[in-house]
Amino acid sequence: MGSSQSKLPEPAVGEKLAERLRAMEAKESRNELEKGYVYIDGQQPPQYSPCSTTVSISTAEQWEKELMQDPKNRLALSALSSNDPKAILTQRLATIKDTQNFNIKIPLEGTPITNQRSSGRCWLFAATNVFRVAIMRKHNLKDFQLSQAYLFYWDKLEKANYFLEQILDTASDDLEGRLVQTLLASPVGDGGQWDMAANLVEKYGLVPQTLYPDSFNAMNSSAMGSLLTTKLREDALELRRLAAKSIDARSSLGTIKEKMMREIHLILTLMLGPPPNPNKEFTWDYYDKNDKFQSLRITPLKFAKELSSTDSIRANSGTDINEVFSLVNDPRNKFNELLSVSRLGNVVGLRGIRYVNVDMETMKTACIAMLRSGLPIFFGSDVGKFSNSSSGIMDTGLIDYELGFNIRLGLSKAQRLMTGESQMTHAMVLTAVHVVEGKAVRWRVQNSWGEAAGTQGWFVMSDTWMDEFVYQAVVDPRYALCG
């Protein structure tokens, strides 16, 4: 990608171009009906040339000639070649109906809006934004952030260890095989899952952001990620080489692996800064929402366990935030079954990645029940599809590709997953829903892209977009059973 973004067209210009395209499309539809391309018995069907296995220059030239004969296509060329197609083809009706008005909204959404900057830490931001609501209730806070960098540090260290263990476990597998190549593709990527966040909180606890704020490399993680990846790939090849000479690789190579881990620890500590010790007390001084000074001395592990305290569970309508679990909608697989992902995780010895596969109606019913109880919801989606980060709208009717290109995109959710067209790319938080006659219409989304995105950091998701591009929601088991 280039170093700067393309300039978007003025809204008025974009709307006029789109209106002209729609008008010409309507006229074209009438003309198509008049052409009479219907085969009538007794007439000879049109002759078609045999299929060609190569791209013909002359054929492409003929296609271009026919394309440019249509005034609509000439207008489309002028509009689409000079502007962002998404901006030109944005449908005004979608932007009007997707408003920040909801009749079911949790009373404490959690502020301020967070910003993951140039990093792939969305899952850690979404998870801590869920956790913080319970902490804000317990400590009577107006604004609060947990340290995302604290979990980020330990996640990188744990993922490095998890990766090296996987390399030892697959030491006898073909280096060029699909499994080993998949492991080598991303040893310590920024991304993650809810279960991975839960593992980190269980082992390392939580700390306020003021005690371990973002460093430059937490906010801009690519350089650190590249260095760690290169180092771990070298370590992987060395472990495989030594394992080939050893009868019991795991026991004989323990010292070498520990040296490798110490080097990873060095890189992380110098680039992110030394994190608080999970077992040592920190002192957190703060003002509650009544401007009364408070001071708390506690360890990160005990701070996290406050989420499961009697007071916290009572404040969260009987929900233990540490006990929620993932629902997933994957129409490739049978519903009401437990799914897991082999060799995906971060902390060796703790939970793997698990989901209960359900239909979307069950997932949405559980989400609405959670919101009625005043609880935020961690969810995973494919955020880049039919969305606009400036307006903060996610709606399947937002961009009309058929209008501009005369093509209709019709893949089902299952087909998009099977072909790699769609996958979970981003985690956010649900805090409200608008329900009409018992059916959800739109959802309020707390993002982690700062206040410049959407409406001061808040997005709106249409219910149809949720059906197509939301894959995961983390809920209290009680509400999933109700669904």
Image: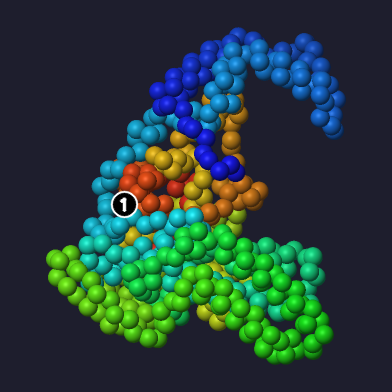
Residue in the foreground of this view, choosing between 47 and 345: 345
Residue 452 left/right relative to 260? left
Q: Which residue is mark 1?
A: 432
Residue at image location 60% in from the left, 16% down from the top: 74
Residue 328 visible: no
Q: Residue at x 33, y 78 (%)?
A: 303
Camera sees residue 300? yes
Q: Give the camera-side residue of 16 and 311.
A: 16
Q: Estimate the x, y position of residue 203 in percent, counting from the top left.
A: 45, 80
Q: Considering the numbered disc 1 on the image, is that residue within a helix, a strand or a loop? A: strand
> Which amino acid, mark 1?
Ala
Residue 118 in percent (x, y) is at 49, 55
How many numbered badges does the structure rendering display?
A: 1
Q: Picture quarter containing residue 51?
A: top right
Q: Is residue 296 above or below residue 20?
A: below
Q: Nearer the viewer, residue 245 or 361?
A: 245
